[in-house]
Image (tube, rainbow, N blue to C red):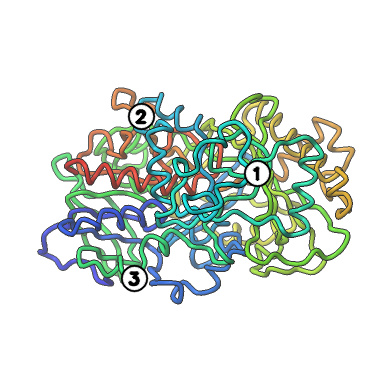
């Protein structure tokens, strides 16, 4: 498994670049067919089983990706706004970001799927993808043999559990227990303010308060590599994996992709393949395409990159969810969580999106932010936090080729940010922009962005003031009441404290080939005009779903694998 094919061997049938949420699924599903050879490569390590991942990456009470420069991450310098530099981690190695993220595994909303289908991707309609969503999961709460009799009495939540959820898929799903005192108080406060219960956030009931579906079970984060590529799958004779392998350029001969130039153990070589699938993530995949001459012709020409295929949509429609961290001080030590850092979660539709699928998310952390950043479950005296984000679908950013001479972004804006920001700022100052793409998120570029975030902050403050939470809390630490009551002051606070949910999508969007300004691949990831080349990661989503995209990333792997198995790749 640890060596690339020898020179002179026949090309592999499918070369998958990136072993993350979608890539691990692709390798597992495609190698189910014994006559198809599959090679899975990644720049990071390829652990084999829980023992090789180790407790640092498996402990569901922590988020390795929150720790600056964790070895299982790659950090990208970005600008959230022109004045707000930041760094965004992406997972590397088997499992990708599912190895280092919080384990949040919530499906996109029906409105997201149907919007994507209406944009020329009919296979993405909710009713079309539901069988794939069911088949990828082992839902331990609402699966066929799960606790389907729990309260499900609002709107679409009355749908039959066996039709909505699976119990035989590779990804285990368990919802947070809400037994921690802070989680119990959050649930009670949400009810006191009149928000409905939402016991199953993976059906399509109206948004409300409920536990978080997660791929963490009994305190263990089951990343997608661990779940989809156990030892018995890795031992398939037609599947090979290769870690420590950096993809440098896609090889295109006579208009067709025929392989990838890689660097492995200090040497460069070409890995030949009949089909190349890029699953390197919404930053690395478009960057690799651009470096290979596939992207906006004018931009490629400016950087002296020979144009292989003019696809102006690549990098032009980046989307993500803006986020803020709101700290509150418990009156006494509430104890550490047993199984997961995730508490309860409230979704609601903002006044801007009244009646919509819920564009505001208030997610509870049961571990102090200082603990998540420092790798410790308990930090005596530290505040707890709510992660407050706007789950909008509008693409606002862009990704371009970066200049090798690009300087490091100014980090002064970090100096007075949240308690964990100094570590991030310090890490940012030591980052090199050399070889990295130029990424701008375009957050806060519309008045509605501020309106939604103001409502999210004020709703969180109201929850903390409700009797159930105020009994445990000294209240919101920042912003102060005077700032909360003043739109302009609150907007300034938002600008100074803005972060990202790290839900990047849309950098290689899918859609029909007659609209190349908006679409670079078809609904099954085939790159328009480059036979033999596909993309399978959240790059292909036309915009960002109303929920974090981890579950949707796995779905992408399932859909593209199914398409390859049904079609001549």
Describe the element under mark 1 as helix, strand or loop: strand
Along the line of sight, which residue is nearer the eye, 302 or 138? Answer: 138
Comparing labels 1 and 2, the label whose residue is closer to the camera: 2
**Is residue 8 shown left or right of residue 352?**
left
Closer to the N terminus: mark 1 or mark 2? 2
Closer to the N terminus: mark 1 or mark 3? 3
Question: Disc 1 versus disc 3: distance between alpha carbons?
Answer: 38 Å
Question: Disc 2 versus disc 3: distance between alpha carbons?
Answer: 35 Å
Q: Quadrant of the C terminus?
A: top left
Q: Could you tell me how many numbered marks the image carries?
A: 3
Horizontal and vertical percent for residue 350? 68, 29
Work out which residue is located at the far front of the displayed protein and give it.
Answer: 149
Please name the residue that numbered disc 3 is placed on: 231
Q: Residue at x 22, y 46 (%)?
A: 565
Disc number placed over residue 383 in the picture, else none:
none
Callout 1–callout 2 Cβ contact below 8 Å:
no
Q: Is residue 499 visible?
A: yes
**Is residue 515 shown left or right of residue 154?**
left
Horizontal and vertical percent for residue 348? 67, 34
Q: Residue at x 73, y 43 (%)?
A: 496
Disc number placed over residue 323 in the picture, else none:
1
Please name the residue that numbered disc 2 is placed on: 121
Describe the element under mark 2 as helix, strand or loop: loop
């Amino acid at each position: 498994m640890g060596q690339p094919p020898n020179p002179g061997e026949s090309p592999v049938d499918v070369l998958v670049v990136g072993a993350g949420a979608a890539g691990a699924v692709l390798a597992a599903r495609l190698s189910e067919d014994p006559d198809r050879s599959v090679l899975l490569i990644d720049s990071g390590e390829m652990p084999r089983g829980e023992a090789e991942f180790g407790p640092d990456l498996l402990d569901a009470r922590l988020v390795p990706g929150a720790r600056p420069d964790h070895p299982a991450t790659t950090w990208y310098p970005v600008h959230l706004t022109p004045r707000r530099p930041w760094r965004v981690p992406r997972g590397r190695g088997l499992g990708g970001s599912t190895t280092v993220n919080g384990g949040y595994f919530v499906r996109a909303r029906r409105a997201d799927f149907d919007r994507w289908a209406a944009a020329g991707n009919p296979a993405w309609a909710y009713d079309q993808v539901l069988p794939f969503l069911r088949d990828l999961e082992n839902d331990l709460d609402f699966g066929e043999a799960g606790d389907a009799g729990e309260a499900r009495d609002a709107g679409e939540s009355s749908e039959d559990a066996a039709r909505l959820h699976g119990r035989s898929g590779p990804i285990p799903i368990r919802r947070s227990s809400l037994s921690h005192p802070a989680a119990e108080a959050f649930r009670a406060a949400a009810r006191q303010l009149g928000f409905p219960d939402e016991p199953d956030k993976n059906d399509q009931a109206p948004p409300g308060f409920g536990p978080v579906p997660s791929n963490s079970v009994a305190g263990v984060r089951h990343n997608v590599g661990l779940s989809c590529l156990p030892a018995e799958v890795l031992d398939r004779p037609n599947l090979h994996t290769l870690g420590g392998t950096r993809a440098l350029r896609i090889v295109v001969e006579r208009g067709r992709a025929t392989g990838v130039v890689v660097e492995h153990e200090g040497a460069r070589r070409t890995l030949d393949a009949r089909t190349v699938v890029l699953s390197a993530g919404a930053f690395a995949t478009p960057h690799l395409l651009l470096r290979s001459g596939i992207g906006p012709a004018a931009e490629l020409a400016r950087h002296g990159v020979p144009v292989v295929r003019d696809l102006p949509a690549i990098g032009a429609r980046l989307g993500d969810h803006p986020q803020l961290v709101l700290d509150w001080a418990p009156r006494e030590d509430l104890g550490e969580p047993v199984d997961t850092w995730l508490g309860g979660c409230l979704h609601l539709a903002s006044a801007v999106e009244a009646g919509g699928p819920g564009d505001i998310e208030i997610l509870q952390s049961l571990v102090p932010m200082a603990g998540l950043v420092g790798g410790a479950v308990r930090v005596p005296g530290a505040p707890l936090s709510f992660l407050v984000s706007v789950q909008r679908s509008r693409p606002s950013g862009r990704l371009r080729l970066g200049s090798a001479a690009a300087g490091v972004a100014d980090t002064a804006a970090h100096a007075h940010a949240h308690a964990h920001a100094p570590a991030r700022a310090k890490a940012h100052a030591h980052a090199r922009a050399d070889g990295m793409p130029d990424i701008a998120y375009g957050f806060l570029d519309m008045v509605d962005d501020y309106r939604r975030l103001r409502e999210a902050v004020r709703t969180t403050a109201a929850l903390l003031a409700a009797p159930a939470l105020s009994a445990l809390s000294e209240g919101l630490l920042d912003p102060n009441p005077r700032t909360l009551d003043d739109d302009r002051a609150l907007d300034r606070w938002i600008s100074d404290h803005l972060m990202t949910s790290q839900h990047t999508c849309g950098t290689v969007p899918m859609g029909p080939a007659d609209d190349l300004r908006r679409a670079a691949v078809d609904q099954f990831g085939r790159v328009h005009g480059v036979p033999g080349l596909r993309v399978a990661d959240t790059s292909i989503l036309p915009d960002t779903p109303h929920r974090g995209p981890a579950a949707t990333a796995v779905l992408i792997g399932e859909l593209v694998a199914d398409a390859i198995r049904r079609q001549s790749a």
